[in-house]
Each structure stands twice: as C-alpha cells, then as structure tokens.
Image (cartoon, grey):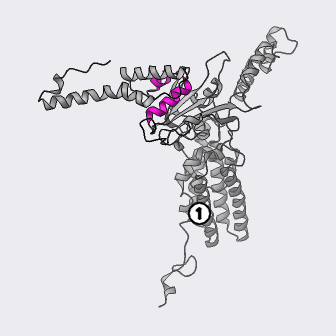
Amino acid sequence: MGIKDWFPDGENNSSGWRLDIVSLLAVIGESSMESHSQALTSSWTCILPRIIPAPQALLKPSRPTRMPQVNAAVVGVHNGTLVQTLNYFPNILHPIEDFPPFAFKVLRIIHARNKLSTPPSAVLEREKVPSAPNSIDMLGMVESGSPHPPARQSTISTLRDRLSDKKKPRVPPQPLSPLNIISVLSFMWTIGLIIWARYLRDGTAIVALATISCASSIVGYASWWSPVLMKRTFKSKVPAGDVIIRTREGAFLLVKCNEDVARELYTGTEECQYYVGTQQYRILVAIGTFLLMVSVVLLGNCNFAMQAAIGASYIVLNGAFWGSSLIRKGRFWDLSNYDVVDDTPPDAADAHLEQCDTVEGRPSFTRTMWFAIRETKKIGWVKRGGAAPKTDEWDEWLRLAEQEASNGNRAWNAVEIRETVVGVAESTPQRSAEDAAEQHVPAYEVPPPDKR
C-alpha cells in the first residue's frame, strides 16, 4: 500500500473527490458582505445578475435608515448645537480614529465650485435681483389668469416634490469604486461560467447559476438606495457653522465652515432614500430567499468540473471583497463636492507631541483644549459639550482662557495656570483628610477648604 492510497482517487465516486460542499461556499463570507452592504447597494451595479458571496447578508427584515455613526461630541462653536455622534461622511473626510490622543487640527471645509451649493456671496447678490420664475412658479401661473390650460393639483404636487428632492445634497458612489469593479467583473465571470456549463452540457449548473444570479439581482434592486443629506430650508442670516469635534481620547478638531456645510455634514441626519417601497421590498426579499434556497440545492448537484469552477469563483470573490475592506472609504464615495483645507496653526500642529520636559511642554488634555479655545475665542462650546468639569475652579480657568484668547495672547501658560487655579483646590481636600488621619480626627469633621 503506497501513499497514493491515503487520498481520494477519481471524481464523484465512493473513493474519489467530491465537491458537494460548494453550496456551503456560496453562503460563506457574510461578515465581509455586511460591512460592504450599504456601499454595494448604493450603485446601480447592485442590480446586475451575478454570483456574490453570502447573498443572505442582504436578506434583512428591515433596511437601515441612516449610515453608521461614530461616538464623538460635535458642538457648534457659535450656535451651541450639540450632537453626540459624528456622521458617516465627515468621518471619511477626516477620520477621527486616525487622530492620536491630545491631537489638535483646524480644517476649513467649503463647497466646491459649480457643485450642489452656491457661495454665500452669490446668494446675497441673487437676493438683490428679482429672480426669474422657476418651474414651480410656472405651475402656479394657472391661478393668475394664465392662458395655458390648468394643470391638475396632484400633478403640481408631484412635480413640486420631485424638484425639491433633486435640490437635496447627495453623495453618489465613485464610478470606479472597488465594489463597482468587482460587481461588473463578477457579472462578466458569471456569463463565462454559464457558457462553460453549456459547453459541458451541465443543465443543472446553468439553472443554478441563473437562479442565484436572479436572486442577487432581485435582492440588490430591493436594497438599492441613495444617500441624501440635510439642507437648510431658509437662507436667512445665521452665525457661522463652525463645529468642534472632541474624541474620547482627548483630541480636538475645529472645522470652520458655513451653516450649509455644517447642516449637511454634522448637525443634520444622513437619510437613506430607497428606490423601492417597504412593502415591495418585503415581497422581493421573499422571492430572493426562495431563489437562494433553490440555487443552494442545485449547486450541490452539478458535475465535478462545474462544482470546481464555481467553488473557485466563490473563493476568489470572497478574497476580493475581503481585500476591498482594506481600502480607505474615500475610494467608495464621491465627496468631491467638498474642499478640505488644513488651517492648523504652526504653534499647535504637534499638540500630541512633547515639546519640552516641562508641565507646559508635555501633551495634555488641558493644553489641547486651550489650543481650541485660542482659535475659537469662545468657551461656550466647552461647557455645552462637557469638555471640562462643572466646578467653580474650572469656570474660573475657562474665564481666564477666554480672556487671554480674546486678547491674542497665544503664549499663555494654560497648564500652569490650571495647576494654580484648579490643581490646588483639587489637592486641598486630600491633604486635609491626611492631616485629620494623623491627628485621629474623622475626615468629615474637617471644615471644607475656602474656595477662593
């Protein structure tokens, strides 16, 4: 008996190789597909009939209404708006998970030219000149004696809704995003597999590939959506929309922008606008689930050559989707509507690094917060966002910091003053307890320190 007898010999016989497990390969990779589900279904390529790993990841009883969010305190510098989470798209423009502890950065975000929004100066100039009637105004001319035949009220309402939806800011997917490329290539590869199955005269493989491709197409169409951002309804004069973002690691990010950008990216909600209604979605998901179960059964009854080809295809696709998760998210979404400029002052660019071996030179939360106060010249956002403790000593330090920032004193020793104003007051109760213990006096009998 040689070593050759230790392994299967031949195909699809009692002692040969069998690939019935290929049906299991079709449903492996659900975690990778879930991480790409929203980006994958935001493009029209999601409706292409093709084989995809773990199509059951898209078979959900309900669809998400918002994009994923990140825990971070987002506070309006001038308007005091507080949001406890950071939206998905601004975290792509400036990933806060890349910020080291006690880091500080100033970014200026504006709308790109000839894109969704008009510069504020152009808006003011346009308000001075009587504007031409738009499509909605033309529809309303029927009420002022227009010679045109009157339109139905329902038609007017429908057109008005469509015009308003088109004005909402949107973030389309990148045309050449990795997921779009994978979708198109898998569509072409599926056609090649069907042609190969036709050459091998494997009717079961043809039906299996057609069934699972239809299932992915139906489920993709049911989940097809478009991200819609919030937009200001009125164009009245409002304060600047600057926001401060504070991470849990003590890093601060100051974003200078107008209220339109702040509403779209930070204070507004990112809505998921689906092309299929909820009831139609449930019907399509039910059909897709049935087709998926049928295709899994059929895949296990293909001949050996087709099982090997389909199994290898699923292995390659799983590797492709896993590899695409290593690519930065900016490659998946078209955020060219926003221009991001780094305006961090040179004396605060390395807030997370040690400058010298002193209290003022070492990185700390107080020093980074002082850098943020120095740039905003306000402390209202500090209290609103809970960045500092609510004590009389900290209120005194914040008052001094605001005064020095308003006076333009950029070399103020914020950490040393904090040690003087806050540190002594915090250490006094502990020292009083130690003195009481030495004198065998209960700590609660020691009078509280004078807070001056």
Q: Going by the picture, which residue comes out furthest to the right?
A: 147
What residue lies at 64% left-to-right and 72% top-to-bottom? 305
Decide if residue 385 is in sight here.
Answer: yes
* x and y, in percent, of residue 449 in the image: 25, 21
In this view of the protein, which residue sits in the foreground, 299 or 313? 313
> From the viewer's perspective, is 242 left or right of 167?
left
Determine whether 330 is above or below 120 in the image.
below
In this view of the protein, which residue sits in the foreground, 337 or 110? 110
What residue lies at 64% left-to-right and 44% top-to-bottom? 330
Determine whether 16 is above or below 132 in the image.
below
What residue lies at 37% left-to-right and 29% top-to-bottom? 419
* x and y, in percent, of residue 53 in the image: 59, 56
The residue type indicated by label 1 comes to Ile
* x and y, in percent, of residue 122 in the image: 76, 21
What residue does disc 1 label?
315
Q: Going by the picture, which residue comes out furthest to the left?
A: 440
In this view of the protein, which residue sits in the foreground, 313 or 256? 256
Q: Is residue 251 magenta?
A: no
Most common SS among magenta residues = helix
Part of the protein shown in magenta = 364-385
Q: Quadrant of the C terminus?
A: top left
> Could you say whether the residue bearing mark 1 is in a helix, strand or loop?
helix
Q: Is residue 384 magenta?
A: yes
